[in-house]
Image (cartoon, rainbow, N blue to C red):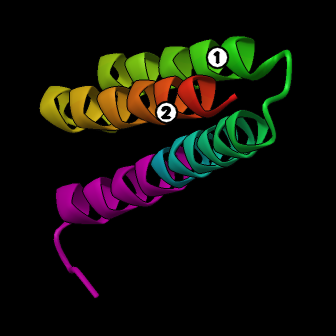
Amino acid sequence: MANIKSQIKRNRQNERAHERNKAVRSEIRSRVKLAVAAADQGSDDAEQLVREAQSRIDRAVLKGVLHKNTAAHRKARLAKHLAAAGADA
């Protein structure tokens, strides 16, 4: 436990940011999982779900939760998954 007042405050701030970041990452995982499942089933709204997931990934970059290269990698993987599912159909 920190004794210095500024460090105590910083710990509180870090805890709140950690919770916010955890929520954002969780939502991204959920959206990606939905999009991948829809693409695998050949669902009509798969493209829309992928677009929404990519949008959430972009927002996470703006909020500083994800690095831009990580986001690019995840978005490319999602698009590749959608394309492969479209080619199979």
Give the x, y percent position of residue 39: 69, 34
Judge left or right: residue 20 versus residue 49: left
Query: Secondary structure under badge 1?
Result: helix
The residue positioned 61% from the left and 34% from the top of the image is 88
Which tag is nearer the camera, tag 2 or tag 1? 2
Residue range in magenta is 1-20
Along the line of sight, which residue is nearer the eye, 21 or 51? 51
Residue 13 lies in the magenta-colored region? yes
Q: Looking at the rendered structure, which numbered label has been put on residue 84?
A: 2
- How crowded pointer 2 is (Cα within 10 Å; few <14, some 14-19, many 20+) is rated as few
Give the x, y percent position of residue 12: 41, 58
- How crowded pointer 1 is (Cα within 10 Å; few <14, some 14-19, many 20+) is rated as some
Along the line of sight, which residue is nearer the eye, 14 or 67? 67
Judge left or right: residue 81 versus residue 86: left
Residue 67 lies in the magenta-colored region? no
The single residue placed furthest to the right in the displayed view is: 44
The dominant secondary structure in magenta is helix
Q: CA distance from mark 2 to mark 1?
A: 19 Å
Judge left or right: residue 44 versus residue 76: right
Q: Looking at the rendered structure, which numbered label has been put on residue 52?
A: 1
Q: In this picture, is 59 found above or below 64?
A: above
The residue positioned 31% from the left and 27% from the top of the image is 76
Q: What residue type is disc 2 on?
A: Ala
Work out whether mark 2 precedes mark 1 in sequence or the reverse, and give the earlier one.
Answer: 1
The residue positioned 49% from the left and 23% from the top of the image is 83
Q: Where, quadrant-wise, is the N terminus in this rendering? A: bottom left
Q: In this picture, is 62 found above or below 87?
A: above
